[in-house]
Amino acid sequence: MITNIPSSQDLTRSALTSFFAAWHSLIQLFHDFNRTYDLDDPQWAEELQDYYEHCQAELETIYALAAQASELALKARICDVSPYLLLLGNGTSFGEATGDTDFSELRTIDAVDLPNAVNAICSEKLSDSFKQRFTEVRKLRNKIAHLGAAGKTSDPRDILKLLIEQYCELWPKSKFLKLWIEYIGSRRYSYFHDGKWCSAEMEFSEVYETCFSLLSKRQFEKLVGFKKSQRRYICYKCIYSGGLNRHDMYSDLLTAYLTQENVLTCQLCDECSDVDRKACSQDGCKGNVISIDEPFSDHCHTCGQEQDE
Ligand SMILES: [Zn+2]
Ligand SMILES: [Zn+2]
């Protein structure tokens, strides 16, 4: 019999890991430049161009991960109907079997055939633009795999756009920021997350503003779920679980939105907090959303300061 039959959930998890490995590297690549220069300042245009060229090898890895993410996500969709459909089209033949056959030893559907197979088998169809991008990325990835280089200079901003479109088509109903931080919490480095000096929230807090600044209004709304111009607030649940309060890093993590008059919803942890609506007592703070939950009750969700008696 065939053993180790993959599940759609396993494939989706692997697809998301590949996707966010690409995404996180790309955002770090932008962020590293921003730490010394400024991505948006035209006076550094020449440095930025040099930097992009310097990054080509890493950009190629990012392309390869993006291609892998798409392939796994499409396989997950087919697998959701039936894992055996992944064996389609390869004329799988069996020799005289003496024992079990591991599914991974069988040849599965070629990547080139995946989009059409999904559209024939699954109820949710892929758009033409997705199919076109899928082919482009796959070709580029193959070039890199066989020739060592894609042969053209990649612009990281084009890759960013590509990843956003890919994500929106593959996982339109999922919480982007939550999946991103889950990825950060699953990486090799998370072994050192002690919640005191180092945590997924701290790693996230370092890079997310660079990411937000790169997103257009439309991209922001698609990924984060709220308008880019809408005011963001501190989520004390994330501050606490990430240990940011130990370092007075309150305003380094603004990921919550007012979803009702007295309720904040955080896009990073996906949890709600009840709040009091009154003016913050701190000089110079215009905030009027005050925490009522322990252990940060009476803290302002805008400036992070405790209210004066
Ligand atoms: Zn949160
Ligand atoms: Zn305040």
Image (tube, helix red, strand yellow):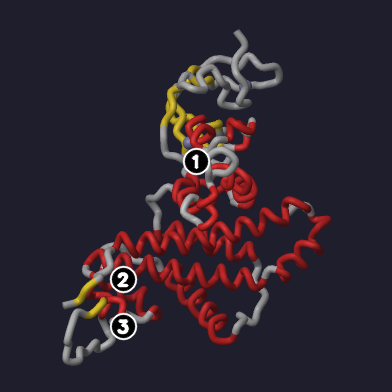
Element class at badge 2? helix
Give the residue displayed 80% in from the left and 55% down from the top: 42
The CA span between labels 3 and 1 is 43 Å
What quarter of the picture does the C terminus occupy?
Answer: top right
Pick whichever of labels 2 and 3 is earlier in the sequence. 3
Pick whichever of labels 1 and 2 is earlier in the sequence. 2
Residue that sits furthest to the top in the current view: 309
The CA span between labels 2 and 3 is 18 Å
Q: Amino acid at mark 3?
A: Arg
Q: Residues within 10 Å of mark 2 (few under 14, many from 20)?
A: many
Give the residue displayed 45% in from the left and 71% down from the top: 68
Element class at badge 1? loop
The percent position of residue 251, horizontal first and vertical second, equals 62, 33
In screen coordinates, is 212 left or right of 17? right
Q: Amino acid at mark 2?
A: Val
The vertical placement of 74 against 39, above or below, is below
The percent position of residue 219, horizontal first and vertical second, equals 54, 52
- Circle 1 is placed at which residue position? 226
Numbered badge on residue 107: 3
- Circle 2 is placed at which residue position? 118
3 and 1 marks in contact (CB < 8 Å): no
Pick whichever of labels 3 and 1 is earlier in the sequence. 3
The vertical placement of 15 against 211, above or below, is below
In screen coordinates, is 106 left or right of 183? left
